[in-house]
Image (tube, helix red, strand yellow):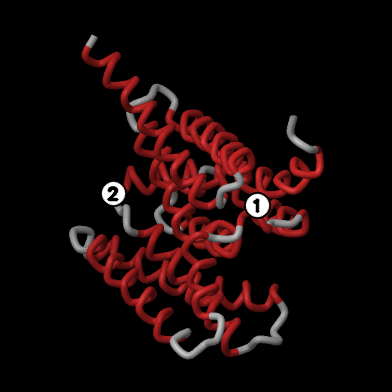
Amino acid sequence: MIDISVLSLFAPALFACLLISLVNGPLGAEVVRRGIIFIDLAIAHIAGLGFIAGTVLFPDAPFWLLQFITYLFVLSFASMFWMLERKLPQRVEAWIGVSFILAASMTFLLVDDHPHAGGLIKNLLSGQILFTTWDDVARLGLVYGVVIVAMWLKGAHRHPYGFYVLFTLAITTCIPVAGVYLIFASLILPGLAAERTSNPTLAVVLIGIVSTVLGVGIGMLLDLPNGPCLVVSYILVTTLVMLQQFKFKTS
């Protein structure tokens, strides 16, 4: 029998991950459709660089100000990717990859002499989903609510530039909580698995929800880090879905 206090500890993380799956799944399907797989890693690392730079250079700045500045910083790169997609569609993926390694390298250079460099890098990559609070869920829900309305009611994520704006807003908001690895998993894996389904939008959301419940549940039961558990869960669920599709295709 699981103690109720343990459930209450994991509840904010579960709600945050469910919110992330509602947004990242459809955005990831659009990433797969556009064929710009590196963009999530690039945007996540650029957002992480912005947050870490703000934390290191302006340690007393309020969180909302750091997030706003980071959003403007990341949006400038997203706008550059949009222009590259229009002008150099055959090379946009390469330049997005270059931006990814640039942001990652700049992050390491920035924290080289920082006393908490290891913790900052670990949080950037693996996130700190277990330490999510209800205040974090509220902030995430507020921003993601806007993104969900724009996506589900207006289809803004299918607009050439609207996609980049929503993508930037979503990733910048969840990077302090989820980390680069979970962001990549929640974006790309459901999109790959749902590509050949009859209703890809519904499929990516369901895959995200199942992966989230499974990952958080395993982390809770086995007392393992939630970030890596969620990544493994996304890979497992995606693999099972794709194997099932292959089975039906060959039968």
Horizontal side of residue 141 vs 73, given as left or right: right
Q: Position of residue 87 (x, y in %)?
A: 24, 65
* Quarter containing the N terminus: top right
Horizontal side of residue 133 vs 175, given as left or right: right
Q: Position of residue 151 (x, y in %)?
A: 55, 45
Give the SS element for disc 2: loop
Frontmost residue, 220 versus 165: 220
Residue under the image location 67 percent in, 78 percent down: 65
Frontmost residue, 223 versus 57: 223
User: Callout 1: 10 Å neighbours few (<14), some, many (20+)?
Assistant: few
Q: Is residue 244 above or below residue 145?
A: above
Residue under the image location 48 percent in, 33 percent down: 201
Tags 2 and 1 touching, CB below 8 Å:
no
Label 2 belongs to which residue?
35
Could you tell me how far apart the alpha carbons at marks 2 and 1 are, in whole angstroms?
Answer: 25 Å
Residue under the image location 34 percent in, 44 percent down: 32
Frontmost residue, 90 versus 19: 19
Q: Mark 1 is on which residue type?
A: Val
Give the SS element for disc 1: helix
Question: Which numbered tag is attached to residue 232?
Answer: none
User: Callout 2: 10 Å neighbours few (<14), some, many (20+)?
Assistant: few
* Quarter containing the C terminus: top left
Q: Earlier in the sequence, mark 2 or mark 1?
A: 2
Q: Mark 2 is on which residue type?
A: Gly
Horizontal side of residue 77 vs 55, given as left or right: left
Label 1 belongs to which residue?
146
